[in-house]
Amino acid sequence: MMKTQLLQYISNNAIKNNGEEKSIHLCKDEKEYAEQHSIISDDIKVILEEASFRFKDAYIERCDKETDDTITEVELSFLNQPITYLKNHQKEFIYLESDWFDVIKVDSISLEVDDVFGIYDCLLGLKLPKKAESSIKSFLNGTLLEGAIFSLMFNQQDGLWDFNISLNHITGFREDMSIMDAYTLIYEFLFSLIVAIEEEK
């Protein structure tokens, strides 16, 4: 699962340098996993990047919560704003796509503030089989902070899990973090989820 996805990412993104040497840019989690599972060939040099590297080519929109319509497409620099932007613009949500999301089995991740509870919600579709339900819930119940709120429902039509989770209950969340840091936190949380499910097999 993770091994296949990461191997595919490396295969698609390894580039040739001078002298025909290949290199791949990876962040810490992906580099450590790749080394542990010996999925990088000896002829590829690994260049370690900051976590924000995962979003350098991201597609990002500000959207209207009521209609789901796009308000505007925004540049990467938008993610440097504090996550409290969402509390100050509660009628909006942020929609983000990244090639790196293939590694964690999602297409996109949206962030918004819940109108009732005032917590930061993360919404995504998780591409895992229906039989993974108990493993997903076991990970969530064992990892999220006390009082965590999440919704997990299998969508038969799309063949994926409609997954909503409170960012506030993921270890490491701070309300003074940037939107970029919030996306990094949820990415790394989902990375851990996929690895944990894989290791159960």
Image (spheres, rainbow, N blue to C red):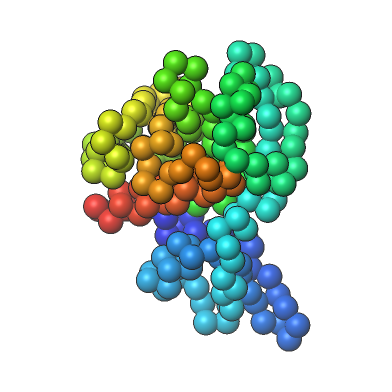
Residue 154, compared with residue 24, is above or below; it is above
Q: Quadrant of residue 95?
A: top right
Residue with the most extreme bottom position: 19
Q: Residue at x 69, y 33 (%)?
A: 61
Q: Foreground residue, 201 or 114? A: 114
Residue 115, given in percent of the width and then of the height, sits at 49, 17
Query: Looking at the image, how many numbered discs can be counted on the residues?
Result: 0
In this rendering, does residue 75 appear at all?
A: yes
Q: Quadrant of residue 129?
A: top left
Q: Is 116 displayed left or right of 152 in the figure?
A: right
Residue 117, given in percent of the width and then of the height, sits at 42, 20
Q: Residue at x 45, y 57 (%)?
A: 4
Residue with the most extreme top position: 66
Residue 63, given in percent of the width and then of the height, sits at 66, 25
In this rendering, does residue 11 appear at all?
A: no
Q: Foreground residue, 135 or 129? A: 135
Residue 79, compared with residue 4, is above or below; it is above
Q: Is 62 displayed left or right of 194 in the figure?
A: right
Residue 128, compared with residue 192, is above or below; it is above
Q: Residue at x 63, y 24 (%)?
A: 89
Residue 18, given in percent of the width and then of the height, sits at 75, 82
